[in-house]
Amino acid sequence: MWSRSIFLFPAVVLATLRIEDPSNVISPKLWAADNAIVPDYSIPVVLTQPSPIKAIHKVNGESSSAEHLTWSATANDTSVLLVSNNATFSGSHLKIVKSGYSSNLYDASFWGFNAAVNVANASTAKFDHVNVTVHNGAAQFYSYGEDTIVEVNNAWLYSSGPVSHGLYASGYGTIIGRNIQVYSGGKRSSSFSGDSPVGHVYVYDSIAHAAGIGSATFYALGDIYGENVLGLSEMGPVVFSDGGNTINLINCDCTAGLLGGVAMFSDAQRQSGATLNLTNTKFTTTGAEMPGLWFGNVVADVTLSNSQLVTHSGILVVANYSAITQSFDYYAGYSDNSNLLPAEVTISVTESDLMGDLVAYNGSYISWSLGGYSRWKGAAYSGYGEAIFDVSLDATSHWTLTRDTYIRNFTDSLVSLDNVQSQGHTLYYNATVSTWLKGKTVRLSGGGSAKPLSSSSSDDKSSGRRWNA
C-alpha cells in the first residue's frame, strides 16, 4: 500500500492519503511462482496472425452485449472473450477470471492469444464497471488491428505472470481507459502498453502499479497519452519507448525503480522522431544511479513544462551509445548490439525548477534549453569518451553551476550573463561556435567566469573527462 503525506505547514502532518491498488486485495505472495517466470523470447518471431484465436465466448461479425455476469477460462492460449471481424460489443458489471499459460509469447504479445479479452480486426468494444483477474501470464484487455477501438471505464485489473499488461494495443489498434486501477506482478508486464508494429493507448484518471522486472507504467511502440495517472514501477521505468514514438503525459505523478524515469531507445537501427512531452508532471527515480531521463541509440525531442524530475542519483538526463537488452534489466553496449549509434536529444524546459546533471557518453549529444522562468542547478559532463552539449537560456531563466562545464554552443538572452550563478566554477564555451561572446572571458556572479575555448577539443584536467566541441 502506498502512503502519501500532505503537508500544509512545515513539519506538521495534517493528513495522510492512502492510495490502494489491486495488490492490496490479492496478495502477490499468493502468486509468487507466476511472477518468478522469466519470459522466453528465444523462439522464432511470428510475423503473421495465427488462427484460430481460441476463446470461450465469441462475438464474430455481429453486435452483442452482456451485463452482471461472471465469465472465466482456464485452458492455455484461450481467451475468455473474443470480439472480432467488424463486431461490436458492450459489457457492464462483468467479472472476468482467466488462468492458463501462453505457450508462445510472440502469439501472446503480438496477437493477443490468452488475453482475458481480445478485440480484433476492425471491431469496437465498450466496457464499464469490470473486474478482471488473470494468472499464469495473460494480458487483460487487448486491442488489435486498424479501426479496432476498445474503451474500458471503471476497471479493477489484477495479473500475475509474464507479459500480463493491463491495457494492451498492437497492430494499429486503439485502447482507451478511464478510472483504471491496475496491478501486474510479473516480468515485462507493463500497466499500459502499445506493441509492434504500432499501438495507440490513452489513459485517464488511473492508478497503476507494476512490480516485475521490465514492467513500466507506460510501454510505447506507437502513441501514448496519459492524463492524471499515478504510477509506480518497482523494477522498471515510468516509460519504455522503443523507436520513433510519441508520449504525452499531463498531470501525472509516477515513480520508477529501475533504469530511469524514461528509457527511450531504438532496439535495432537508430530511429528519429521519438517525442516526449511532460506537462505538470513529476517523475521520481529511486535508484542510486538512475537518471530522470535516459536516451540510447535514438534521436529524440523532449519538452518539460511545469514539471519535475526528482532523482536520488543527481542525474537529470543521460544520452548514450546504448540500448536495452531483451531481459529489460540493464543497458546494452556494442557487444549486445552492433547497430548502435550515439543518442541525440533536444530538450526544451519551461516553467520548471530542476536540479541535477546532464551526462553524455560516446559521442552523444544533448541540447538543453531553459525558458519561461525556469531554474536549473547542475552541470554537463562526459560520462565516457566524447560528449557534446548545447545550452541556452532566455532572459527569465537562471542557471546555477555545480562544477566546471564545457559547452559547444552556449547562448543567453542576457548578454551580461547575470542569470548564471557560477558558485566559483568555470563555464567553458567553444569560441568558434558561440561567436556572440566574441571570445571574451566574462565574469560570472559567484566568483567564476565564462571562458572561451577555440580548439576543437580540450581536456578537463580536474575530472579526467574529455569534452568534444
Image (cartoon, grey):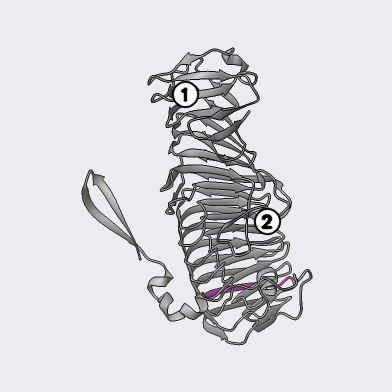
Does residue 155 appear in this view?
yes
Q: At 26% across and 48% down in the image, what residue appears?
A: 7
Q: Amino acid at mark 2?
A: Ser
Which residue of the protein is positioned furthest toward the right in this rendering?
48
Q: Secondary structure at mark 1?
A: strand
Residue 286 position, x and y percent, is 42, 54
Does residue 133 appear in this view?
no
Q: CA distance from mark 2 to mark 1?
A: 37 Å
Q: At 59% across and 70% down in the image, what residue appears?
A: 163
Q: Which residue is mark 1?
A: 426
Q: Are marks 2 and 1 in contact (CB under 8 Å)?
A: no
Q: Nearer the viewer, mark 2 or mark 1?
A: 2
Q: Quadrant of the N terminus?
A: bottom left
Q: Amino acid at mark 1?
A: Thr
Quick check: 189 above or below 261? below
Secondary structure, magenta segment, majority class: strand
Q: How many marks?
A: 2
**Front residue of 198 and 299:** 299
Residue 251 position, x and y percent, is 46, 48
Mark 1 surroundings within 10 Å by alpha-carbon count, few (fewer than 14), some (14 through 19), many (20 or more) = many
Q: Quadrant of the C terminus?
A: top right
* In magenta segment, residue 277: no
Q: Which residue is mark 2?
A: 335
Mark 2 surroundings within 10 Å by alpha-carbon count, few (fewer than 14), some (14 through 19), many (20 or more) = few
Residue 427 position, x and y percent, is 50, 24
The magenta segment is 86-94
Mark drawn on residue 283: none
Q: At 59% across and 62% down in the image, what residue appears?
A: 193
Q: At 60% across and 47% down in the image, what residue appears?
A: 295
In the rendered structure, the answer to whether residue 218 lies left or right of residue 206 reads right
Q: Secondary structure at mark 2?
A: loop
